[in-house]
């Protein structure tokens, strides 16, 4: 069997054979890709607009009934399914005399169907699989009663296949491997199917072959024309080829179909007669393999959609060969350009995980997927989460993690099983942000190309890497500032105070002239409420729902009310909701506080118990505005068990640190952070209070405005450069940082941006001594893309995160602002845990890390 018809010597060409230029196709058929660089075709490729139009015409012009019956509508469905089954076989050059095609939900369902049949065979089965298998192939081993083996190297497979004849096994065997790794696009030898078959003649202990073609078929022709060398079973998912429908296939070599006789389960549609009651007996259908395996009602609408998919695909792209050539062309370009990315000191920015002997020039060894990690000019690895966050604000869609390919990623990254177990006990889980362990990456970044990928996608991605991950200069080349000078400068005052009564919603500005209580857990009323998803109980945030910025709460302490207005700040009319501040209060207006039906909710991964408001008026107020089923919830009083522990980078005292530079960070901590006294907090993310400095915001804005906007270095015109719509050199408001306290210098001409990075503690207050409130600095605030949400419009842009990533990164963290915590004994002060008050205009006196004041 030759898996791909195009030979290695065929040179790859850009959209040749396509109906027209790929940019034209994109414009007309994929309007959603307009400002997006979509590079996750291995996750799923995208459907063309005319596929959906054609499917919808089909459905609205014919009456389709359930295929298992005799009515005309039913017969029509059954007929269409038969026709499309044949067409699908032909798509893979599979002769219907030799092969049958079973419709399944997806490739994984096909694998499970096979595994179940093998498990039910009289002596169980033995299972062999390649280390680069997708997770869905690995799981089969759990059913293999006669044992399993994972092949790590290709020559192990060859040697095993060679010795099969003399093997003394008494059970059936199944050997599975991917046609193409979904992790790095590596392609595997097709000879294995033939080799295994040639050496297994006896029926009792025959070894069958299972080819996982799910990744391969999305950009390559699969050619099953030679049944004698083809795999016994081939699985794939159609959405990976066409984007739609969500449907899979199991293609069975008819001569291997006997194994399905062992399968015990049956469902509606796969039996000819069933007796129930005292005589449990049934007769399975015998007519065809698919009739025996397709339990229940077929996903017949999806199967009907497949016809539109075949048609549209052929009309747009001509053939899979054309797509193979197009994607190979792009993958090669992308690969070469990524390899060429070098830091100022000549070191490479990208570590690509390609397999030895595979080449982006040779389709028999490599498909259009690139797996990689990034490191900086000092060789330090960059965490995948940071890359994903930046990619997301730049509208670039990539995939990261272990990519559902546990063996492939572990081998590429050099992690042993023992390492992985250690990571697991350290808390690492699929999809989390444990990006780097032992100074090495735990996951991989992946970009993958598809039929409608274009040169612009490649350009945009390389430009993105160049902009953020190629170091142009050594770090820390910033204007030097002598420590001695700065200490003589005048002091600071409180420019503004903000309370965020509802987590992730708008700010309530404390009015000038009003003193505001400070409690151990922060400013009074700060993050006392949040919104929770009614289905999952997870708290909502602006990262997911930027419109939350437009939910604006006001604290009316005089009336004891929290008033909430939804809508843009300048909109004259918004909907208003009033909630009583009194927990016991029965504010009859709209709310009832649910005191006993507390359900656990998740805030930043921690479990906390929240009291959700049960009133439909409250939930519909928020649900209607955000378009997500949610309700308001309140944090219970004084029961927080969460506390702030400074992060490693948070605080450092290094004494060999002169001259210090504004904008630079202290070096790595010289000693572990002092153990924190447990600081109670409410729902705020990190600490009781967050402080930023006006002059730092100003400095950041200068950087934003002076940043030349990157254009991809492309030969194509770049006016339509994907993502350009979100680029802006516009200054950002201080509000995006969602600080509680903004401080500013007394003398505006004496701005010292980022000097707060060196603060160890501060005092705020009008007078001296007892009237001043003291705060400890817990550490710097790590930022995510949430700072890109404009707090007035609820719109997302790419600043200031893009500039922060370039100017404010230390040890893989992007820092801006300081977490602070008030010092004092609440019992010695007023009631309710109040430590004192602050007010706009109060003097702020910082102490620096080098001061030995404390
Ligand atoms: C995507 C993929 C799968 C799983 O496909 P599902 O549609 O999720 O069942 C299995 N193997 C490979 C190689 C894949 O790329």
Image (tube, grey):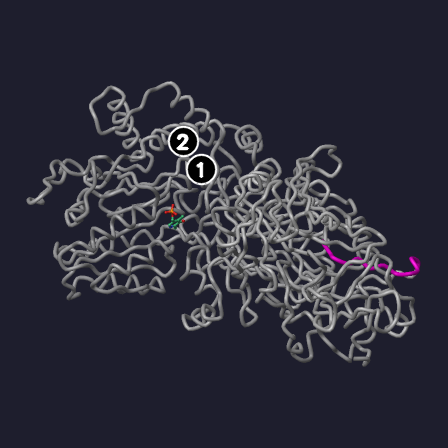
Above or below, 156 relative to 796: below
Position of residue 653 in the picture relative to residue 75 (left or right): right
- Seen at 52% across and 51% down, the residue is 399
- Pointers 1 and 2 in contact (CB under 8 A)? yes
- Tag 2 residue: 309
Q: Nearer the viewer, residue 3 or 461?
A: 461
Position of residue 679 in the picture relative to residue 19 (left or right): right
- Tag 1 residue: 243
- Please state the horizontal and vertical placement of residue 71, each as a whole percent of the image: 22, 21
- Please state the horizontal and vertical placement of residue 140, each as a whole percent of the image: 29, 57
Q: Nearer the viewer, residue 376 or 197?
A: 376
Position of residue 799 in the picture relative to residue 583 (left or right): right
Q: Judging from the image, what secondary structure is the residue with disc 2 in?
A: helix
Above or below, 2 relative to 820: above
Q: CA distance from mark 1 to mark 2?
A: 9 Å
Above or below, 472 relative to 290: below
- The verdict on residue 313 being magenta is no
- Please state the horizontal and vertical placement of residue 85, each as a whole percent of the image: 28, 32
- Seen at 60% across and 47% down, the residue is 586
Q: Is mark 1 within 8 Å of ligand 1?
A: no
Residue 417 visible in the shown view:
yes
- Seen at 37% across and 56% down, the residue is 135
- Residue 343's disc number: none
> From which residue to which does the magenta span run?
738-749
Q: Nearer the viewer, residue 273 or 553?
A: 553
Residue 223 visible in the shown view:
no
């Amino acid at each position: 069997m030759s898996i791909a018809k195009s030979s290695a010597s065929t040179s790859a060409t850009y959209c040749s054979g396509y109906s027209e230029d790929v940019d034209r196709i994109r414009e007309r058929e994929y309007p959603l890709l307009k400002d997006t660089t979509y590079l996750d075709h291995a996750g799923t490729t995208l459907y063309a607009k005319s596929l959906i139009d054609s499917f919808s015409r089909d459905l609205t012009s014919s009456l389709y009934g359930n295929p298992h019956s005799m009515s005309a509508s039913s017969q029509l469905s059954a007929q269409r399914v038969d026709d499309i089954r044949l067409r699908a076989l032909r798509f893979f050059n599979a002769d219907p005399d030799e092969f049958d095609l079973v419709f399944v939900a997806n490739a994984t369902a096909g694998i499970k169907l096979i595994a179940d049949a093998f498990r039910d065979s009289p002596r169980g089965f033995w299972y062999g699989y390649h280390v680069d298998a997708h997770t869905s192939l690995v799981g089969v081993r759990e059913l293999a009663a006669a044992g399993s083996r994972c092949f790590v190297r290709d020559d192990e497979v060859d040697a095993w296949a060679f010795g099969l004849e003399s093997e003394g096994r008494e059970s059936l065997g199944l050997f599975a491997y991917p046609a193409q790794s979904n992790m790095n696009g590596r392609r595997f030898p097709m000879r294995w199917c033939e080799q295994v078959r040639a050496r297994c003649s006896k029926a009792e202990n025959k070894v069958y072959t299972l080819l996982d073609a799910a990744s391969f078929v999305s950009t390559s022709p699969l050619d099953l024309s030679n049944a004698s060398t083809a795999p016994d079973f081939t699985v794939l998912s159609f959405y990976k080829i066409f984007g739609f429908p969500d449907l899979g296939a199991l293609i069975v070599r008819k001569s291997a179909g006997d194994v399905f006789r062992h399968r015990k389960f049956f469902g509606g549609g796969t039996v000819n007669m069933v007796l129930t009651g005292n005589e449990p007996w049934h007769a399975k259908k015998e007519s065809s393999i698919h009739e025996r395996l397709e339990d229940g009602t077929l996903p017949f609408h999806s199967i009907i959609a497949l016809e539109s998919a075949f048609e549209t695909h052929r009309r747009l792209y001509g053939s899979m060969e054309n797509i193979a050539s197009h994607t190979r062309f792009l993958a090669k370009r992308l690969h070469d350009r990524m390899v060429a990315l070098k830091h100022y000191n000549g070191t490479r920015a990208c570590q690509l995980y390609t397999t030895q002997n595979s080449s982006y020039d040779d389709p028999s060894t490599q498909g259009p997927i690139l797996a990689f990690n990034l490191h900086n000019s000092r060789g330090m690895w960059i965490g995948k989460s940071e890359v994903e966050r930046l990619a997301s604000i730049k509208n670039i869609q990539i995939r990261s993690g272990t990519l559902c390919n546990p063996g492939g990623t572990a081998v590429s990254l050099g992690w042993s099983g023992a390492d992985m177990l250690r990571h697991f006990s350290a808390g690492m889980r699929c999809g989390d942000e444990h990006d780097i362990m032992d100074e090495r990456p735990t996951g991989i970044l992946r970009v993958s190309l598809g039929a409608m990928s274009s040169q612009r996608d490649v350009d945009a991605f390389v430009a993105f890497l160049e902009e953020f991950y190629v170091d142009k200069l050594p770090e820390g080349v910033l204007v030097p500032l002598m420590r001695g000078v700065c200490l003589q400068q005048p002091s600071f005052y409180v420019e503004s105070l903000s309370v965020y009564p509802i987590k992730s919603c708008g700010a309530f500005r404390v009015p000038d002239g009003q003193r505001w209580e400070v409690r151990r857990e922060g400013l009074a009323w700060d993050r006392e409420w949040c919104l929770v998803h009614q289905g999952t109980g997870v708290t909502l945030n602006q990262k997911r729902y930027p419109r939350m910025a437009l939910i604006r709460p006001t604290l009316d302490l005089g009336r004891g009310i929290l008033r909430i207005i939804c809508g843009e700040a300048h909109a004259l009319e918004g909907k208003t909701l009033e909630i009583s501040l009194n927990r016991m209060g029965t504010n009859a207006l709209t709310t009832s506080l649910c005191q006993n039906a507390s359900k656990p909710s998740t805030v930043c991964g921690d479990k906390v118990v929240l009291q959700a408001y049960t009133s439909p008026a409250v939930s519909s107020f928020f649900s209607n505005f955000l378009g997500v089923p949610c309700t308001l919830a309140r944090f219970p009083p004084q029961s927080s068990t969460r506390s702030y522990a400074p992060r490693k980078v948070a605080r450092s005292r290094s004494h060999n640190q002169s001259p210090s530079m504004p904008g630079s960070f202290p070096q790595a901590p010289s000693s572990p952070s002092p153990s924190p006294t447990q600081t109670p907090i409410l729902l705020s993310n990190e600490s009781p209070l967050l402080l930023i400095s006006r002059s730092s915001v100003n400095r950041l804005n200068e950087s934003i405005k002076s940043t030349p906007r990157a254009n991809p270095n492309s030969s194509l015109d770049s006016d339509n450069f994907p993502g350009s719509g979100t680029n802006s050199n516009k200054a950002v408001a201080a509000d995006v940082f969602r600080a509680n306290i903004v401080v500013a210098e007394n003398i505006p001409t004496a701005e010292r941006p980022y000097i707060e990075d060196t603060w160890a503690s501060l005092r705020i207050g009008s007078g001296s001594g007892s009237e001043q409130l003291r705060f400890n600095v817990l550490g710097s605030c790590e930022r995510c893309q949430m700072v890109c949400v404009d707090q007035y419009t609820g719109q997302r842009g790419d600043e200031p995160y893009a500039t922060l990533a370039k100017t404010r990164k230390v040890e893989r963290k992007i820092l801006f602002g300081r977490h602070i915590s008030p010092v004092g004994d609440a019992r010695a002060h007023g009631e309710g845990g109040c430590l004192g008050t602050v007010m706009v205009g109060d003097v702020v006196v910082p102490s620096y890390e080098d001061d030995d004041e404390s």
